[in-house]
Amino acid sequence: MISSTANVDGIISAADKASIPVLDRGFLYGDSVYEVFRTYRAVPLFLEDHFERLENSAQLIQMQISQSREQLLEEIRRTAIEAGISRESDAYVRYQITRGEGAVDLYPDPSLKTRYVIIVKALPSWNPVFYERGVNMAIPNVRRNPVNSLDPNIKGGNYLNNIMGLTEAREAGADDCVMLNRDGFVTEAANSNVWFLIRGRLVTPGSGNLKGLTKKHVHRALQAAEMESFEEDVHVNELLDATECFITSATREVMPVVSLTLLDGERLEFPVGGGEVTRQTRQIFSDYVEAHISEHAQDALV
């Protein structure tokens, strides 16, 4: 059984006993970047991609990561072993880099050394109904941050924009939200990418969202299976022609959406458990992941 375990700058403890200094900029300002991956049989999924995206996030906020990939991976391994990860149980791994500890001042001292925080725990168990039936989504009034304000490709520690959108959707009775930008184009869900089958074409928004790694590999899996998928701008008005919908993320994989409530209260209905394209995508991606894990067995954390 995997126990929730944390590693703060090399000090490993139970997650609920871990602590960081109150002057850490990640705590004070959300001045941090992070990644989350899941394991299959102790093998991290898309590990190289996650490190590349972490480094890109850091570059976008002009953060110099003090730790090397090799050091971070070794600390992830140490934490995973302490947590009791095994080939029989799947794990959730989050590693976060904060700008470090310094003066209470918005401007970050360039000499700061970054701090790392690693969390390893059991993989979240999603409600089976979300796969059997699908999730109910709603579009909130809260709009996604503009790209030229806070680029969604900074996978950072400040999620207030997403939290506000999700909270509004939950209070309206939905499971999750689909956020629009200020011009009415679809961006993403609270912490996953969203896909639609519109007039027979499988599309996912191409801008204003985090370039999800699951999304990236779903595209690749579909291409290998000779199924077309497109990444392009999707205006909210186009959703009236959508006949299927699903979301993708590291921990969800491919999860069907059964309904989407628009701002005017109109409720779009999609096939229970996912339509034909959604079900095909889920199976194709599952096979793709299985092949990937088999090819990267040498990357197992234990």
Image (tube, rainbow, N blue to C red):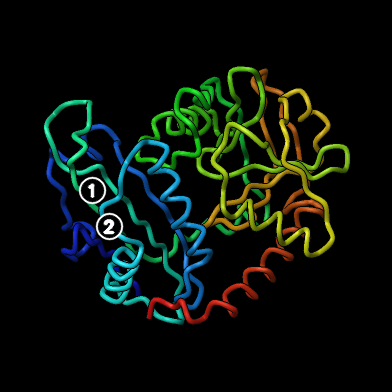
Front in this rendered view, residue 293 or 196: 293
State which quadrant residue 110 falls in. Answer: top left
Q: Earlier in the sequence, mark 1 or mark 2?
A: 2
Where does the image place residue 15, in percent across and percent down from the top left?
A: 23, 59
For label 2, the crowd category at 10 Å Cα-Cα, with few meaning under 14, some 14 to 19 and many 20 or more, is: some
Q: Quadrant of the C terminus?
A: bottom left
Residue 76 relative to residue 250: left or right: left
State which quadrant residue 188 falls in. Answer: top right
Residue 10 relative to residue 65: left or right: left
Residue at 49 percent of width and 78 percent of height: 41
Residue 116 relative to residue 300: left or right: left
For badge 2, the amino acid type reads Gln
Residue at 30 percent of width and 45 percent of height: 64
Where is mark 2, residue-wise? 67
Name the residue at the right extreme.
200
For label 1, the crowd category at 10 Å Cα-Cα, with few meaning under 14, some 14 to 19 and many 20 or more, is: many
Name the residue at the front extreme.
111
Residue at 53 percent of width and 64 percent of height: 46
Where does the image place residue 240, in percent across and percent down from the top left?
A: 80, 28
Where is mark 1, residue-wise? 114
Vertical comparison of 151 with 135: above or below: above
Q: Quadrant of the N terminus?
A: bottom left
What is the CA distance from the residue labelled 1 to the residue labelled 2? 8 Å
